[in-house]
Amino acid sequence: MPRSARAAAAAVALLVLGACTVATPEAADPTLGNLRGRTVHVVATWSGTEQENFRAVLDEFERRTHATVVYTSGGTDLAVLLNSQIAGGQPPHIAFIPQPGVVAELARRGALVPLRGAAADAIRRNYSQTWLDLGTVDGQLYGLYFKVANKSVIWYRADAFAEAGVTPPSTWDELIEVSRTLVEAGITPMATGGADGWVLTDWFENAYLRIAGPERYDALARHEIPWTDPTVVETLTLLADYWRTPRYVYGGAAGATQVTFTQAVAEVFGSRPSSAMLVEGDFVAAEINALDRVTVGEDARFFPWPSINGSPPAVVVAGDQAVALRDAPETHALMTFLASPEAAQIMASRGGFLSVNRNLDPAYYPDDTTRALAAAVTDTPLLRFDLSDLTPQAFGGGSNAHMWVLLQNFLADDMSPAEVAQRLEEAASRDFKDNG
C-alpha cells in the first residue's frame, strides 16, 4: 500500500476511534434527570411474582435516569422493618406501605417527606380526588397509590364447579348451597389461607360491609362504635357457621390456620388440587399465572363477594401507598415516574396488578378477567378501603396485630362470636388509645 494510502487509512482509523471515544451513553429522561451515581433504596411487602414484576418498573427507571435502585422485601412485617430503619437513622428513600394508619402515624412523627414539585403535579394529573385524599394527612400530600387491590373476589376452579354441576352464586345463601353441593360431590369447597391473618380480616371486612352497611363500617374503622356491637357479633356468627361446617374448609377449622395464602392458591389451582374456591383479591391472578397448565379466565375464574340479606354491590379495596422518607432528587424522581401511566403500564401488562391511574389505558391489562376486576374498583358506587389497614398498626397492621391473631384464634378454636368480639374490643380500646 502506498504511503499516501496508509496515511489515509490511519486517518480514517483515528476518526473512527475518536468517534468511539467521545460517544455518550443514552441521554437521561429530561423530566426525571440524570441520576448517574445515585442509589435509591426502596422497600415494599412484595415478594415472588409481584417483586419480579415491580423490578421491571425499577429497571425502566434505571434505564431512563442511570440511577441504581436497590429493592428490599419487608414482607407482612414491613412496618416493623421501617421503624427499625428510621430509629437507626437509615430509612429507605421510598417505602410502599399498605396501611394508611401507619402512613398517618409516620407523617405525624415527621418521618415522611411531603410530596411537591413534579411528583405532586404528576399525582394530581393522573389520580382522582378520592385517591389524592387517601394519600393526604392533615392537609398535606404524602402518598401515591401505585398498586391497588380488589379484595371482594372469590376465585373458583371451573372444572370443579362443572363436576358438581354448580354455577357461581350471587347471594350468601347460594354460596352455602354451592358449598353443600360440592361436598356431596366429594370436593372441599374452600381453602382459606388462615395462616396469614390478613386473609381472615378480608373475610370479615367483606361480610361486615354487607351486613352493617358503609356508615357503621366507617365508624368501626375509627372505633367510634365498639367491637361488641351487634353487627360485629352477627358478622362473626356468619363466618363461624361457614368455617365450622364439617368439610367446608380445607384442613378443617383448626387445620386451616396452618395453610398459607400461597398454599391455598395451590390447593385450588395447583397440579393436585384439593379445593374449589379461594377468597382473596385480584392479585391471585399473578400467583395462578405462575402455575403450570392453568389459565386465568378459563381454568381459573372469579365471582364477586355475594350479597348478604339483599345488600347492594360493594367492593373492599386495599392499596400499596408509596411514601418518601428521604428528601433527595432521586426520591422525587422515582415518585414522579411511579405516578406516570408508563410505570403503571409495565406492571399492568404482566398481570396480577390493578391501577387507579386514570390515564392508564385498560388495553394494557393482559386479559378480560383483569379488566373486569379493574372496572369493579372504578365503577362500583359502594367502595371502602380495607378496614384493618385503617386502624392503628398494633390492631390491624402486621402478623402480630391483634385483629389478625384474634381472627386466627377464632378460626381455630371454639370461641363464641360474642367472646371474640369482646376480645377485639379490649384490644381496640388499648390500641386506639395508645395511638392517640
Image: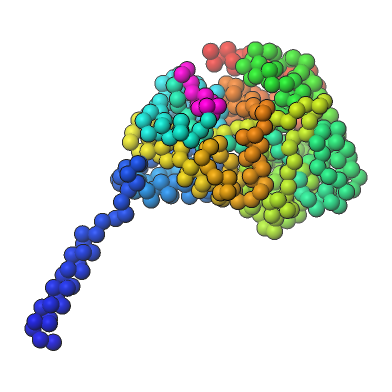
In the displayed structure, 423 sits above or below 367; it is above
The extreme bottom residue here reads 1
Q: Which residue occupies 80% across, 53% down? A: 159
Taking the image as shown, residue 315 lies to the left or right of residue 161, namely left
Residue closest to the far right: 184
Per the rendered image, the range of residues in magenta is 129-139
At x 38% / y 28%, what residue is drawn? 116
Q: Residue at x 78, y 34 (%)?
A: 306
Residue 195 among those drawn in magenta: no
Q: In the rendering, at what x and y percent does residue 186 appear? A: 88, 48
Residue ID at (64%, 45%): 370
Q: Is residue 18 left or right of residue 29?
A: left
- Quarter where residue 235 is shown: top right
The total of numbered circles placed on residues is: 0
In this picture, residue 120 sits left or right of residue 427: left
Q: Position of residue 251 (x, y in %)?
A: 79, 41
Residue 41 image point, x, y percent: 41, 39
Horizontally, is 271 left or right of 69 in the view? Answer: right
Q: Nearer the viewer, residue 309 or 399?
A: 309
What is the quadrant of the N terminus in the image? bottom left
Q: Is residue 95 visible?
A: no
Q: Is residue 396 above or below residue 279?
A: above
The answer to whether one can see residue 4 in this image is yes
Q: Nearer the viewer, residue 337 or 330?
A: 337
* Closer-to-camera residue (211/410): 211
> x%, y% of residue 243?
80, 33
Question: What color scheme is it?
Answer: rainbow
Residue 42 falls in image quadrant: top left
